[in-house]
Image (cartoon, grey):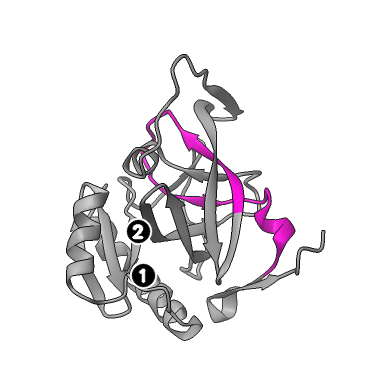
Amino acid sequence: MTDSISQEQAQAILRWLNKNRESILDSYKDQYIAYNEKGIVAHGEHLKPVLEQAKSTNQYFVIYLVPRKHYSIQILPIKFRSVVRHDWQPNYLVKLKHNQIEIETTMLVDSGAEVSLISYKMGKDLGYQLADAESTLVAETIGGNVEYVLRNVEFTIDNHQLITPVAWLQTPTDTEQSLLGREVIFDKFNIEFRQAEEKIIFTWRDNKV
């Protein structure tokens, strides 16, 4: 992993993911992949061995947790099949840090999500644990209920560091898509979606609210 991925490299990395998303979903379900714009440099079911293998290649890379389900996105168990003709997802590169574990990963920017979200699997692999006698929270959705707990996570987005609450799911789901939600993130950045260019632009607001 490197701390000096340029904006041009980041866009190339995301283009590679979008271009190869279907084959990745076919071949690496429920696995972490370490990848860059040239391809996959490491993969596996557990985060730490993937990080170690990827670092040994001396290449820069980012992490993506591949969903188990093909051709669907599950957002708090409501399933949507793609009906759009432009096959692009608004993903962005984000660095997450917890204790000694730091990963640059791909998250789906979701203006409909109140808070950011990580799956049960990713939270466990990042080292999060439930405290003794900690109660879970319940989110009600049209498709049913999911349990979660909130964790304050250190994010780095375009070299800007911030702490934001993240919902760590306690209910296993059919997809492991990480979401970048509105809380804190959308207050700190102006975010522009350019679907025709397959690009998202984050502009730091200089702490203005």
Please provide percent x and percent y for residue 138. Answer: 57, 23
Which mark, residue 64? Answer: 2
Query: Is residue 132 positioned above or below 84 on the image?
Result: above
Please provide percent x and percent y for residue 142. Answer: 59, 30
Q: Residues within 10 Å of mark 2 (few under 14, many from 20)?
A: many
Q: Residue at x 53, y 56 (%)?
A: 155
On the question of residue 132 being in view, the answer is yes
Indicate which disc, 2 or 1, sits on the residue closer to the N terminus. 1
Q: Is disc 1 placed on a helix, strand or loop?
A: helix
Q: Please name whichever residue, 120 or 133, is drawn nearer the observer in this view of the structure.
A: 133
Disc 1 marks which amino acid? Leu
**Location of residue 110 (image quadrant):** bottom right
Which residue occupies the extreme right position in the image? 209
Disc 2 marks which amino acid? Tyr
**Location of residue 195 (image quadrant):** bottom right
Q: Are marks 2 and 1 in contact (CB under 8 Å)?
A: yes
